Image: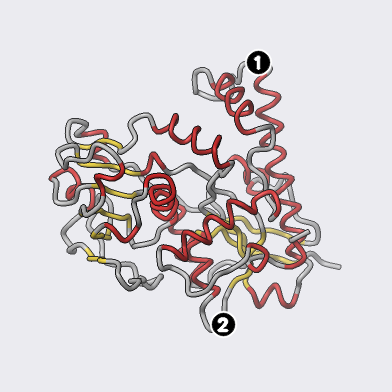
Amino acid sequence: MASLKLRLACWHYDRTRALADGTVQPEGIELAFSSAQQVGEIMQRALQGEYDVTELGLTYYLRSLEAPNPPFIAIPVFPNRLFRHGAIFINKQSGIAGPRDLIGKKVGELHRYGHDAGIWSKGALSDDYGVPANSFTYYVGALDKPAAAADWAAPIAPPGVRIHGIGPGQTLDAMLESGEIDALFSAWVPPSFVAAPAKVGRLFDDYETVERDYFRRTRIFPMMHTVVIRRDLYRENPWIARSLVAAFQKAKAIAEGGYRAGSVFFTPSLMIPWAASLQDRNRELMGDDYWPYGVERNRKTLETVLRYHREQGLLQRAWKPEELFAPETIG
């Protein structure tokens, strides 16, 4: 039987490289792999129906589940994971010395209220520092280049949350540097953080220490994105869910094996001094398999991000982790 031809889009990650170059092919599937300069471009095209299988931000996927005819079904693969305490930037003249000083402040958020990095940052502030997500006035828009509001993902404005779109000639980066906003939640480092360090800094200067302590206490490694299949395609071919999970697992294992082999020679393949030492420190804290796929290995993290979506007004109902993914992939 001929292989099913599918269009897959994912960003350029080490854990998906073997899918991109064809080293790994899902059983029964012939992949046409696509990427883009920015992962947001992939998501935009995915929401416009361009791909069969695609990386998608969790916030977009979760919101799509509450649409009248949900367009996607996910598999428990998480290509993008990052700790997000380091994604909170401040104007140094705003009087913010610690997390609780954010309460009542004007805060920017990249593109829209409820992007994945912001959800995790705000969730951690609420859980660990008593700073609720509705305690700010939000300004949402482009980071460093004025842009029209994106029309490919409808904005959401939960009751009790004060949200303002910035003007067409404004950018969050310039507003942060000038003090028009006091802080910024952003998946991208604002240029002013580098260009104007006397004015712009991080809420947590030593964010790595804070994030390592967060993992030590919670065992949560936040995921930003998952992988989704067009639901109509999945209904016709439910077997592809397991095949794709197995292929993503193999591709990740190839990357992990390369790092293990490279560490024997102190990882000369990377232009990062002391990379081998960093890998040792990470394994000591997080174990050997710190980037797991599947539902059970990620249950607490999934339950936490679902709770954050509810607390921040982004979901109407309470979802369980197993409701998010193709049933064939839950076991």
Instruction: Kindly identify the residue that appears in the image at 53 percent across and 66 percent down.
Output: 61
Give the image quarter of residue 256: top right
Q: Which residue is mark 2?
A: 69
> What is the basis of the colouring in this image?
secondary structure
Camera-side residue of 34 and 134: 134
Residue 160, compared with residue 83, is above or below; it is below
Circle 1 crowding by C-alpha within 10 Å: few under 14, some 14–19, many from 20: few
Q: Which residue is mark 1?
A: 265
The type of residue carrying mark 1 is Phe
| Residue 156 location (% of width, % of height) | 36, 71
| Residue closest to the eye, 209 or 241 | 209
> Is residue 205 or residue 69 the one in the foreground?
205
* Location of residue 39 in the rendering, given as x and y in whole percent from the top left corner: 46, 53
What amino acid is found at the position of numbered circle 2 in the picture?
Asn
Quarter of the image with the C terminus in it: bottom right
303 sits to left or right of 236: left
